[in-house]
Image (cartoon, rainbow, N blue to C red):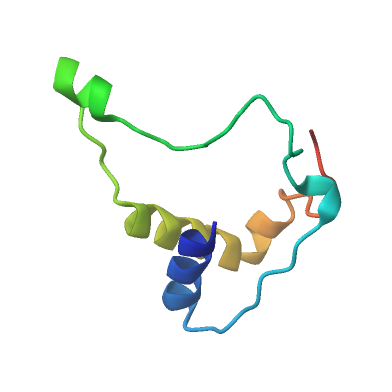
Amino acid sequence: MAEVLGIVKKIMSRDAETVSDQQRKRPGKSEVFRLYGDNSLITSLTDWRPEYSIEDGLRETVTWFMESRNLNKYKSDIYNL
C-alpha cells in the first residue's frame, strides 16, 4: 500500500500521510499471509498481456476521481466487508 500511495502522491503532485484504521487491518491470525498480485501464470499460458501499467491505471483512476460527477457515485462513508 505504501508503494501505491507513493505513486498516487506523485501523480497528484501532493504530499499525503497514511492514516490507519484499526478496524480495517488484517487480523494477526488471518489465514492469508501475503497478498500479491501475480499474472505470470496467465501470461505464460496465454497471449494475454496487461494493457495498463500500475502507474497508468492509477493515473486514470485519479483522473476519474477528480471529476465531481464521479464522486457522487462513490460512497466514501461506507466501509463494506
Q: Residue furthest top?
A: 45
In this rendering, would 41 be left or right of 54? left
In this rendering, would 20 be left or right of 58? right
- Closer-to-camera residue (4/56): 4
Residue at 35% in and 59% down: 55
Residue 54 percent coordinates (x, y)? 36, 53
Residue 75 percent coordinates (x, y)? 79, 49
The answer to whether any part of residue 77 appears in the image is no
24, above or below 71, in the image: above
Snapshot quadrant of residue 40: top left
Q: Residue furthest front?
A: 29
Residue at 20% in and 25% down: 43
20, above or below 44, in the image: below
Snapshot quadrant of residue 36: top left
In this rendering, would 50 be left or right of 71? left
Quadrant holding the C terminus: top right
- Closer-to-camera residue (78/37): 37
The answer to whether any part of residue 51 appears in the image is yes
Residue 60 percent coordinates (x, y)? 42, 57
Residue at 59% in and 61% down: 65
61, above or below 68, in the image: above
Residue at 53% in and 58% down: 64
Residue 73 percent coordinates (x, y)? 71, 48
- Closer-to-camera residue (73/18): 18
Quadrant holding the N terminus: bottom right
In this rendering, would 24 be left or right of 35? right
